Amino acid sequence: MEFKHIPVLLNETINGLNINPDGIYIDGTIGGAGHSKEIIEKLSQKGFLIGIDRDEEALNAARQNLKEYNNYKLIHENHDNIYEILEELAIEKVDGILLDLGVSSYQLDNKERGFSYISNNKLDMRMDENQKLSAYEVVNQYREEELSKIIYEYGEERFAKRIAENICIERKKSPIQTTKQLADIIEKSVPISKDGHPAKRTFQAIRIEVNNELRPLYNTVINSIKCLKENGRLCIITFHSLEDRVVKNAYIDAQGKCTCPKDLPYCICNAKSYGQIINKKPIEASEEELENNSRSKSAKLRIFERREKR
């Protein structure tokens, strides 16, 4: 299947990065290189792009999309390991970082990857197909209490307990092996609603667990900020409230907040600040983009600029 992924908030992200033509930039979730190609277009031959992705199919697509350029390097890794990646490359600081979080359109549309509830394929959901843990293990081996907690916390699903209970009942009869089997169990566990497909929240929750998308995210944001040069920018695109909340809180903490009494003439608490939040409210897709790409509906862009406290 051809790797297709329409980059969301493209112009807003490129503007947000405030690109230095001679700078070094990281696309931590390069996908098919939709954003990266626009970044490279704005770089001189002194400039350089580092593209990271867990999905080898994405890296192959990025390589094809960037074949006319030579000032980039692709790395099969997890953006959570940004410190180690830069250390390996002997690069101390970079001018900008982009993280386009969540699952890509290609991964959703390629039914064989097992991300979609509108299919009948093997339960998988791994972004990195080399890792051992897949949706099959989560669904068939996790204890009922664990499943319920994951579905409730990562899917914000109020019927999590009932879904987990029914999954455990069905898997005792025989292992749950396909996306359709799982979707059917969820449909029978949730009352009919107009709020999208009943399996949407549970599939999101299991995908987040399989790929460990949330637990390291706060530290990844903080570490990314620390890897920026002075006036370097971090742009993060999120697609659901759980991601966005973590990013927002990390930005607030990185910006720092004075806790001194208001009547003091100057700060004595020595609050640490790594920079400034550029947009207090997240940037969302325009009406034009929404018409052309429905998957941009939930996208939110938050921008942080590194500034050493003086």
Image (cartoon, rainbow, N blue to C red):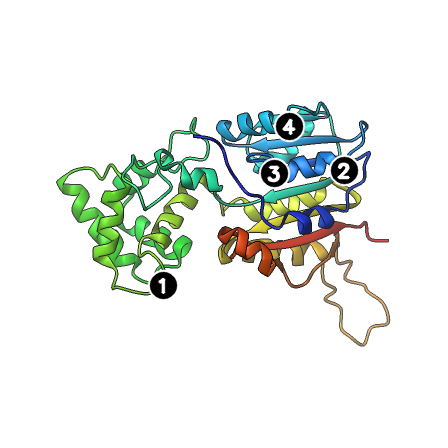
Who's the residue at 13% across and 41% down the image?
173
Q: Earlier in the sequence, mark 2 or mark 4?
A: 2
Nearest the camera: 138 or 284? 284
Task: Evaluate if marks 3 and 1 touch, with contact meaning CB atoms under 8 Å apart.
Answer: no
Task: Give amino acid for label 1.
Answer: Asp
Position in image of residue 46 (x %, y %)? 81, 28
Who's the residue at 20% across and 37% down the image?
175
Nearest the camera: 140 or 194? 194
Q: Residues within 10 Å of mark 4 (few under 14, many from 20)?
A: some
Q: Which residue in the rendered view is the most extreme toward the left?
A: 173
Q: Earlier in the sequence, mark 1 or mark 4?
A: 4
Position in image of residue 167 (x %, y %)? 22, 48
Give the spatial CA distance, label 2 vs label 4: 14 Å
Give the spatial CA distance, label 1 vs label 2: 41 Å
Position in image of residue 56 (x %, y %)? 50, 27
Give the spatial CA distance, label 2 vs label 3: 14 Å
Which residue is under mark 2? 42
Which residue is under mark 1? 195
Q: Quadrant of residue 49?
A: top right
Q: Is residue 125 left or right of residue 65?
A: left
Give the spatial CA distance, label 1 vs label 4: 39 Å
Q: Is the residue 283 above or below the residue 59 in the image?
A: below
Nearest the camera: 299 or 230? 299
Who's the residue at 82% across and 65% down the image?
267
Who's the residue at 65% across and 36% down the image?
36
Q: Is residue 96 left or right of residue 163?
A: right
Which residue is under mark 4? 66
Element type at mark 2: loop
Which residue is under mark 3? 34
